[in-house]
Amino acid sequence: MRIDVLTIFPEMFTCFLSTSIIKRAIEAGVLTVHLVDIRDYSQDKHRRVDDYPFGGGPGMIMRPEPIFLAVEALLEEGESRPPIILLTPQGEVFNQEMAKELATYPRLILICGHYEGVDERVRQFLATREISIGDYVLTGGELPAMVIIDAVARLLPGVLGDPQGAWEDSFTMGLLEYPQYTRPRDFRGLKVPEVLLSGNHEEIRRWRRREALRRTWQRRPDLLRKAQLTPEDEALLEEIIREGKPG
Ligand code: ADE
């Protein structure tokens, strides 16, 4: 997959792209991230990309022409039209479903907004989609772009060691993750649940399912209402509810 990122701060991506799993995905050729400095498309001799808002008011607005020119130059490089995504708190709120959908495209273009906002014509006539990473306001779209790249990259074939893992993790399956433990079995008197040491795969599976349901019921009952539960899940859930909240 190729992801083109339009930004006025390409240096913000350096560490992110050269660390851990993202670095490996790039080295393996599964992911290409192409950073485009929007200032390179400014027609201003000072490389300015912002200007005052018409009608007055606080802050500066990103001008449309450098963004249009940068995207148009990118589109000349390929035949098909990739999604052109503007990162903005006004967008559709990002979630795992969207990550899965975005992971199916061969190419994405991400536009990182800044200042008080982006000229409305970018939103209306250039972007094909607007995404927010949550109901809070950041100083720019760079962190949201990294969040999206990270969530999408781990879904690409060959990026994680376990090819099923990413697609079957808790959010993907609609529940929160069950508790996980590693060595030592006894840490300062805090013991790993006996069932996980039993070697009984069926009991372990049932315990994990029960704990995933318990955690989701306790923390995110909204997810439980949307999850597709089997008759076994319904029975486990009844037990959990009978036992009460702590766990
Ligand atoms: N730009 C500023 N805040 C943002 C957010 N929450 N999501 C996406 N882009 C943003």
Image: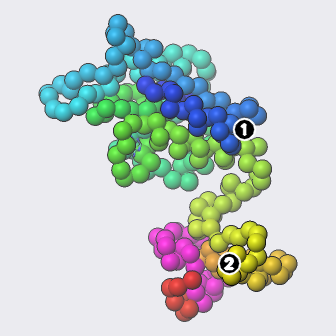
Q: Is residue 100 above or below residue 128?
A: below
Point out the stretch of residues depicted in magenta: 214-240
- Where is mark 2, residue-wise? 188
Q: In which quarter of the image is residue 187?
A: bottom right
Q: Quadrant of residue 201?
A: bottom right
Mark 1 neighbour density, 10 Å: few (under 14) some (14–19) many (20 or more): some
In this orientation, does residue 124 appear?
Answer: no
Main SS type for the magenta part?
Answer: helix
Q: Which residue is drawn at 67% across and 47% down?
A: 155
Farthest front residue in view: 188
Whether residue 232 is in magenta: the answer is yes
Q: At label 1, which amino acid type do we have?
A: Arg
Percent position of residue 182, x then y: 74, 68
Asked if ligand 1 lies within 8 A of label 1, the reply is no
Q: Which residue is drawn at 66% across and 46% down?
A: 154
Tell me the element at label 1.
Answer: helix
